């Protein structure tokens, strides 16, 4: 209880300051730690037909499968380091458990389409750049930013017997809100970040070699040191 | 045995499956109360070509077409069987002379049998001594590179029979429709070992499919086949009871290949081997696209065909060098 009171008191004593590094005053702290929920939208993984060879050399489709990675929520953690006044580098890791859904249709003998599923655990580890474009001289608690990055994709199947790997790339933007800052303290700032991204996955569980894009939304609380 | 249509001879040896095979139906015999899978012990087979000409097919062309078909099987990178041409012979297929002979025989009485494979087996050891293939010269044959209209492609039919000669049974990966005059017409097949041939003139069955490759690799595995590939195993039930003879197909949506097998025992168990690691879609269908006796001795093992095509409700993950773990597919009556 005593510890909690000390933390609350400490946070209340932080000063309002620019949320990013674009102002002339600069953002407090050099290192930013963040954690928060992440939502990843559905992602088409490709379609494929189960074809048999016809006597003419053409194909006879036994059935068709159209597959997607369903939308899912998960978690994201980030560590950012200020490189320059308006530029940060960050490494991030995410975890989510989306479901793979294959809709099977056009079966030669079965009349109604069916959907077969499997849940996977998806992890990403990567890095990126965050740039806060200068918006004026006056410092603001709100700081829009754009970000881009990429990294390693690991998808573990439900039965934990198979891992499929690939790459991901992402780009997007959002806004940081600095609730308070205390430049002379060890804990120099507290804030929140929301962003929207486009995530591009390559390989992994995809049924083809194409890259597949999905939207994503993230929200996190961050502290600065 | 390759049939022009559905009726015809019984397979020369019995299927001896009490446990699910890893892939494919394999031939087997019962020797001294034990089951022996029919295969070439030395992973090598010598064959002779019968020097009998038939209209439109010179012996040299016949030999060359057979050679191409043998090479196709021998070229499977995950299998280790090989075949050697031993020479021309005046012997005829079907003679129990210890020589594996391929040649023509005129059998107009077998009006739906294009070709057939027979075996000579050591009754004590179960060892395969000889396997002959006869091509029915009552039908018109072609050895032309691009095939010929209204003539059966010898290389395609030979490819199927050599699969038998190597120990493979029939695959059910094919779709057919009934003909008005009897028999069936093949709409599509994804296995050279499907029991019914394409119509005359087609050369579409000169290339092995994933199902054929899984079968021959299972019989004669080479290199790291067992470690690199995986399997799916499980049961098929209907109203809580085991289903015998259900055709189970594993489809890999990445490689777009299909490998099939059957439920092969009283527990309704199946096992499909030779699968690429990754997700697979499992489809179970009744065995209704060819005569049941093309696959099983139905007098001994009644095959249940009274159920609807069913997909397993989960994607099945095949691990590298391992098995999916047992899945149970519940089918319902038609």
Image: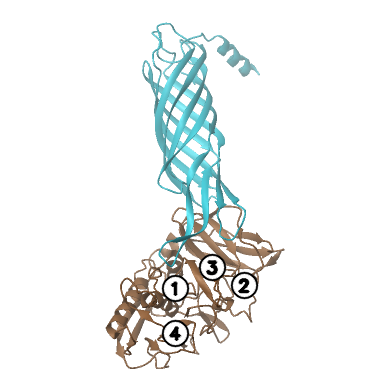
Q: Which residue is mark 2?
A: B265
Which tint is chain B?
A: brown
The colouring scheme, among rainbow, by chain, secondary structure or one colour, is: by chain
Q: What chain does badge 1 belong to?
A: B
Q: What whole-number distance in Å separates the C-alpha atoms at marks 2 and 1?
A: 34 Å
Residue B314: x and y in percent read 59, 52
Up/down of A214 relative to B161, above or below: above
**Residue at the image point whose x is 31% and y is 90% from the top:** B51
Mark 2 vs mark 3: give the one in front: 3
**In terms of depth relative to the viewer, which is nearer, B43 or B156?**
B156
Q: What whole-number distance in Å separates the C-alpha atoms at marks 4 and 2?
A: 25 Å
* 2 and 3 marks on the same chain: yes
| Badge 3: residue crowd in 10 Å (few <14, some 14–19, many ≥20) | many
Which tint is chain A?
A: cyan
Q: Do the CB atoms of the residues marked 2 and 3 lie less than 8 Å apart?
A: no
Residue A219: x and y in percent read 53, 25
| Badge 1: residue crowd in 10 Å (few <14, some 14–19, many ≥20) | many
Earlier sequence position, callout 3 versus callout 4: 4
Q: Which residue is mark 1?
A: B199
Farthest residue, direction front = B180
**In terms of depth relative to the viewer, which is nearer, A183 or B41?**
B41
Q: What whole-number distance in Å separates the C-alpha atoms at marks 1 and 4?
A: 32 Å
Q: Which residue is mark 4?
A: B128
Q: What whole-number distance in Å separates the C-alpha atoms at marks 2 and 3?
A: 12 Å
Tag 1, which secondary structure? loop
Q: How many marks?
A: 4
Q: The C terminus of chain B is located in which quarter?
A: bottom right
**Residue at the image point whose x is 53% and y is 74% from the top:** B184
Mark 3 vs mark 1: give the one in front: 1
């Amino acid at each position: 209880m005593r510890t909690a009171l000390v933390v609350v008191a400490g946070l209340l004593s932080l000063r309002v300051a620019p949320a990013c590094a674009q102002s002339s005053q600069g953002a407090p702290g050099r290192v930013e730690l963040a954690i928060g929920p992440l939502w990843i939208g559905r992602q088409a993984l490709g379609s494929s037909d189960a074809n048999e060879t016809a006597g003419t050399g053409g194909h006879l489709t036994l059935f068709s499968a159209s597959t997607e990675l369903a939308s899912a929520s998960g978690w994201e953690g980030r560590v950012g380091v200020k490189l320059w006044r308006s530029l940060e580098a960050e490494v991030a890791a995410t975890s989510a458990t989306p479901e793979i859904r294959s809709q099977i249709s056009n079966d030669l003998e079965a009349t109604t389409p069916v959907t077969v599923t499997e849940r996977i655990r998806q992890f990403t580890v990567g890095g990126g750049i965050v740039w806060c474009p200068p918006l004026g001289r006056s410092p603001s608690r709100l700081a829009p930013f754009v970000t881009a990055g990429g990294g390693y994709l690991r998808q573990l199947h439900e039965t934990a017997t198979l891992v499929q790997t690939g790459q991901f790339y992402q780009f997007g933007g959002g806004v940081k809100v600095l609730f308070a800052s205390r430049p002379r303290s060890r804990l120099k700032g507290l804030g929140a970040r929301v962003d929207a991204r486009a995530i591009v996955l390559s390989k992994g569980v995809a049924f083809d070699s194409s890259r597949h894009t999905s939207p994503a939304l993230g929200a996190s609380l961050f502290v600065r040191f | 045995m390759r049939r022009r249509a559905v009726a015809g001879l019984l397979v020369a040896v019995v299927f001896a499956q009490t446990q699910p095979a890893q892939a494919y139906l394999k031939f087997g015999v019962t020797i001294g109360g034990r089951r022996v899978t029919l295969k070439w012990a030395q992973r090598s087979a010598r064959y002779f070509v019968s020097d009998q000409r038939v209209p439109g097919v010179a012996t040299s062309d016949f030999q060359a077409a057979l050679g191409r078909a043998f090479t196709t099987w021998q070229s499977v990178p995950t299998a280790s069987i090989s075949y050697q041409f031993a020479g021309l012979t005046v012997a005829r297929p079907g003679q129990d002379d210890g020589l594996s002979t391929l040649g023509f025989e005129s059998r107009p009485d077998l009006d739906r049998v294009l070709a057939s494979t027979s075996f000579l087996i050591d009754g004590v050891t179960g060892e395969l001594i000889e396997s002959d293939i006869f091509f029915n010269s009552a039908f018109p044959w072609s050895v032309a590179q691009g095939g010929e209209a209204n003539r059966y492609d010898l290389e395609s039919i030979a490819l199927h029979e050599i699969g038998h000669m190597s120990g493979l049974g029939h695959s059910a990966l094919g779709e057919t429709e009934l003909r008005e005059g009897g028999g069936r017409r093949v709409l599509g097949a994804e296995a050279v070992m499907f029991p019914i041939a394409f119509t005359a003139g087609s050369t579409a069955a000169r290339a092995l499919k994933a199902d054929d490759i899984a079968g021959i690799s299972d019989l004669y595995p080479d290199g790291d086949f067992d470690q690199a590939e995986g399997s799916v195993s499980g049961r098929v039930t209907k109203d809580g009871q085991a289903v015998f003879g259900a055709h189970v197909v594993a489809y890999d949506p990445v490689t777009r290949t299909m490998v099939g097998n059957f439920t092969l025992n009283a527990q309704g168990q199946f096992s499909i081997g030779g699968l690429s690691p990754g997700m697979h879609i499992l489809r179970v269908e009744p065995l209704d696209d060819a005569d049941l006796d093309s696959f099983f001795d139905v007098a001994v093992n009644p095959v249940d065909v009274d159920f609807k095509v069913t997909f397993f409700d989960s994607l099945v993950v095949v691990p590298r060098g391992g098995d999916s773990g047992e899945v149970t597919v519940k089918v319902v009556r038609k």
